[in-house]
Amino acid sequence: MINIKNLEFKYHNKLIFNNITLNFEKGKITSLIGPNGCGKSTLVKILVGLYRYNGSIIIDEIPLLKDNIKEIRKKLGVVFTNPDNQFVAETVMDDIAFTLENMNYPKITIRKKIEEITKYLGIYDILEYNPHDLNSNQKQLVNLASALVHEPKILILDEALTMLDPYDKERIMIILKELNEKGLTIINISHDIEDTLISDKIYVMNDGKIILEGTKEEVYKEENILHSLGFDLPFMVELSNRLKFYDLIDNTVYDMEELVDILWK
């Protein structure tokens, strides 16, 4: 869905990316993790057309060029770290409607789509609120609704799960998996390795370079490299490893409910 080849980018004469290649597969959940300041958010800004670059980027078979930006942005839904920076209107309803209005959707369709996505995310009852008056969880859910309301082919989460409390984070993870099963390609960019548990593939970045890539099983095996970057293994992986050591389970389990079911059998 997104193919990046030989990407080079400088910011204020500082080399951020030097000939990196990434492939985000259609219909998959891919995580890109790395320490703060390693270039993750810069990559998002390149993908949405905010920065010029050298190299090749193809998004859904369309080259990322100045002339194609509008067409490409219709395919993307993006949620950034700070929700307040994305609000453009005085009510949640108008904020979510903004994207659809710019795409010239009829008013009746806009209302229907907003109702569907806000009920799905559990925020239908706050449509008349000012988004700046909401708590951090609600704010990020509003931004997620704005990113999904036009049914994009690709959802990019740039540290978007950081501000959610554990309950809402778990709920959103379930929703993301449901959307992915319906065909949504998801790119999850994070500095929290726990966010990678739902991934089909993981890239690990440091200093603008890809130093690890593979399935989560392959990446989690590289404990020494992960530890050198300040990452511990996800809790479920650590727990599974200990249970395997005592022959209580045979394989790594990534879901707590599944693990409980196995242990009770």
Image: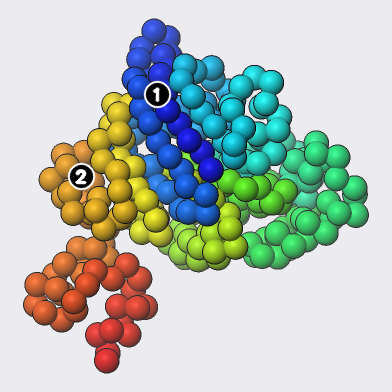
Q: Tell me: residue 177, above or below residue 222.
A: below
Q: Is residue 208 visible?
A: yes
The percent coordinates of residue 181 (x first, y second) are 54, 64
Rendered image: mark on residue 131: none
Q: How is the image coloured?
A: rainbow
Above or below, 34 relative to 112:
above
The residue nearer to you, when weighing 208 against 96, is 208
| Disc marking residue 226 | 2
Sooner in the amino-acid sequence: mark 1 or mark 2: 1
Q: Amino acid at mark 1?
A: Asn
Could you tell me which secondary element the residue under label 1 belongs to? Answer: strand
Q: Amino acid at mark 2?
A: Leu
Residue 72, located in which quarter of the rendered image? Answer: top right
Q: 10 Å neighbourhood of mark 2: few (<14), some, or many (≥20)?
A: some
**Viewer-nearest residue: 131 or 196:** 196
Q: Is residue 210 above or below residue 218?
A: above
Q: State which quadrant residue 112 falls in.
A: bottom right
Point 27% across, 90% down: residue: 264
Q: Residue pushed farthest bottom? A: 265
Q: Quadrant of the C terminus?
A: bottom left
Where in the figure is residue 255, as x and y percent of width and height? 35, 71
In this figure, which residue is indicated by the disc labeled 1? Answer: 6
Q: Residue at x 59, y 36 (%)?
A: 61
**What is the x, y in percent for residue 216?**
30, 55
Count of numbered circles in the view: 2
Locate residue 36 relative to residue 162 in the image: left or right: left
Real-space CA distance between mark 1 and mark 2, rounded to the nearest whole angstrom = 25 Å
